[in-house]
Amino acid sequence: MSHDHKQYERLTFDSFKNRANDGNLSPYEKIGFPDSYRKDKELDIFFDISKKLELEQEKTTIIDIGCGCSDLVKHLIANSKKLNQTLILNDSEEMLSHIEKSDEAIKIAGRFPDNYKCLIQYENQVDAILVYSVLQHIILEANHFTFIDKCLDLLMPEGRLLIGDIPNMTKRNRFFLSSKGQKTHEEYHRGKEVPPLPLTHDFTEKIDDALLFGILHRYRALGHETYLIPQANNLPMATRREDILIVKN
Ligand SMILES: C[S@@+](CC[C@H](N)C(=O)[O-])C[C@H]1O[C@@H](n2cnc3c(N)ncnc32)[C@H](O)[C@@H]1O
């Protein structure tokens, strides 16, 4: 892999706006991924999400918060057209400008939940909310519990919130310390001197088991059902990322 990891570090809402405006970046790079992580993989990602959020139902209302501008959002739009769903897409104006105008999708610009007044009409009415590959950016500049509280305010009873594609550094460390992880590391560096395992020791601004279990615990205590679920094995980062599903009660 030839990409420079540094350019993908500490991406805030405003740095994503700059990426969206950068004409030299591919859609995957605009949303913070090297092409090799997402190109040709977003249909598999969509299928995994669709199962967890039950997106194959007709006439439901779905919100994608931090929708980005790559193929994943296109798959959501196509699905919602097919099934007569109301699809609301939220991201910065700059990111949303790359998504084709579609009569079926409603675009709401602005940083969630600062833009909550634009969404208040959907309070208690939404069947499913997707927050995919976003939590790691929220924790850099806001309180993630406030973010999730406001998502739950939008959901109807039994509505589902998927906080997906969460990079969990403790899971990543466990993977590299496993025999499969060590083999993967050696194969990645085959033919060269193999460096030490890329373990994370500094958890500053990183997500770990404690942060995820805190989310599961808080929303159970508030009366909802919460689940920590793996990603399908064919997803590009399944060894180090996982998803949280919250079902509103
Ligand atoms: C890593 S990208 C993921 C995009 C898309 N969900 C995907 O997985 O293909 C993160 C996106 O979240 C958006 N974002 C970050 N913080 C946000 C916030 N507070 N409200 C709305 N969008 C946000 C960024 O602009 C960016 O497009």
Image (tube, helix red, strand yellow):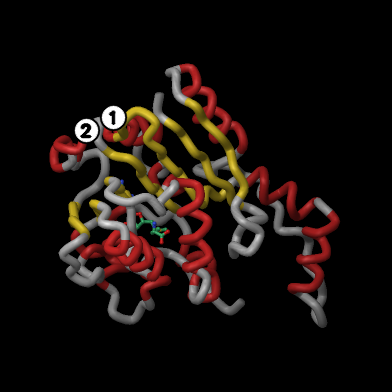
Look at the picture and state if 240 lies above or below 234.
above
Q: Amino acid at mark 2?
A: Glu
Q: Give the image quarter of residue 22.
A: bottom left
Q: Is residue 90 visible?
A: no
Q: Amino acid at mark 1?
A: Asp
Residue 196 location in percent, x, y? 78, 61
Alpha-carbon neighbours of circle 2 within 10 Å: few (<14), some, or many (≥20)?
Answer: some
Q: Nearer the viewer, residue 239 or 13?
A: 239
Pointer 2 with pointer 1, Cβ within 8 A:
yes
- Mark 2, residue position: 123
Indicate left or right for 176 with 99 as reference.
right
What residue is at 31 percent from the left and 34 percent from the top?
A: 155
* The image quadrant in which ligand 1 is located: bottom left
Residue 6 location in percent, x, y? 50, 65
Picture quarter with the N terminus? bottom right
What residue is at 21 percent from the left and 59 percent from the top?
A: 105
Indicate left or right for 173 with 161 as reference.
right
SS for dot 1: helix
Look at the picture and state if 196 lies above or below 202.
below
Q: Which mark is residue 153?
A: 1
Q: Nearer the viewer, residue 59 or 168?
A: 59
What residue is at 27 percent from the left and 46 percent from the top?
A: 61
Look at the picture and state if 27 lies above or below 235.
below
| Total marks in image | 2
SS for dot 2: loop
